[in-house]
Amino acid sequence: MRIAIIGCGGSGKTTLGRRLATALEAPLTHLDVLYYDDEWNTLPKDKFAAVQEELVAQERWIIDGNFASTLPIRLQRATTVIFLDIHPLICLAGIARRRIKHGGGQNDATGVYDRIHWGFIKYVWGYRKTMGPRVRSLILEHGGHANVHVVRSRRAADRLVEQIIRTAGGEN
């Protein structure tokens, strides 16, 4: 099983990935951890792509992260694609909850750094109009062979996790 989880900041990618990784006993990678260091310096694009090529070459994985520029790498090998197309107000609430829970800085559970600024809030608010169509197009182009799930609510995400776990059964 190779699962690519895609969605806006605050959509629940990390939570969904963690639940699936635990239940399926599969390795989980948060792309933000690979792409950013603790001072928000970014990994060069060619190195970021190369790291993902290595990750997707594995037999089993769960990878959460948006990064449309390298999304084809994940989509081409994924057996399951989960696109969290969650309303921006829900995403912003998720970001606020994460900030309250972890107080900003590095999340000890994931290693992901929490960085909220006005540009990020605008990105989240406009994600469905700007990035959503691009993500859908990339999924159609590179992920047509996979089981694709577009999830529009937290409740639907919970149901999907249970369905994937039941379906996987003894695969892990």
Image (tube, rainbow, N blue to C red):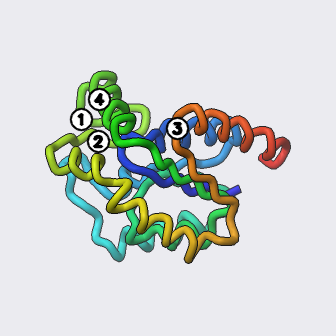
The x, y position of residue 102, in whole percent, is 31, 26
Q: CA distance from mark 4 to mark 2?
A: 14 Å
Q: Are marks 2 and 1 in contact (CB under 8 Å)?
A: yes
Q: In the image, 169: left or right of 134?
A: right
Q: Are marks 1 and 3 in contact (CB under 8 Å)?
A: no
Q: CA distance from mark 3 to mark 2?
A: 24 Å
Q: CA distance from mark 1 to mark 4?
A: 13 Å
Q: Secondary structure at mark 1?
A: strand
Mark drawn on residue 105: 1
Q: Residue at x 48, y 67 (%)?
A: 52
User: Quick one: label 2 or label 1, which is nearer the N terminus?
Assistant: 1
Q: Are marks 3 and 2 in contact (CB under 8 Å)?
A: no
Residue corresponding to mark 3: 153
Residue corresponding to mark 2: 113
Dot 4 amino acid type? Ala
Q: Considering the image in quadrants, where does the N terminus appear?
A: bottom right
| Location of residue 80 (image quadrant) | bottom right
Instruction: List the single residue furthest toward the top.
Output: 101
Dot 2 amino acid type? Tyr
User: Quick one: label 3 or label 2, which is nearer the N terminus?
Assistant: 2
Between 69 and 129, the one lying in front of the other is 129
Q: CA distance from mark 1 to mark 3?
A: 27 Å
**Label tally:** 4
The crowding category of the residue bearing disc 3, from other C-alpha atoms within 10 Å (few below 14, some 14 to 19, many at least 20), is some
Q: CA distance from mark 4 to mark 3?
A: 17 Å
The x, y position of residue 112, in whole percent, is 35, 42
Dot 1 amino acid type? Gly
Between 105 and 89, the one lying in front of the other is 89
Instruction: List the single residue furthest toward the front.
Output: 129
User: Quick one: label 4 or label 3, which is nearer the N terminus?
Assistant: 4
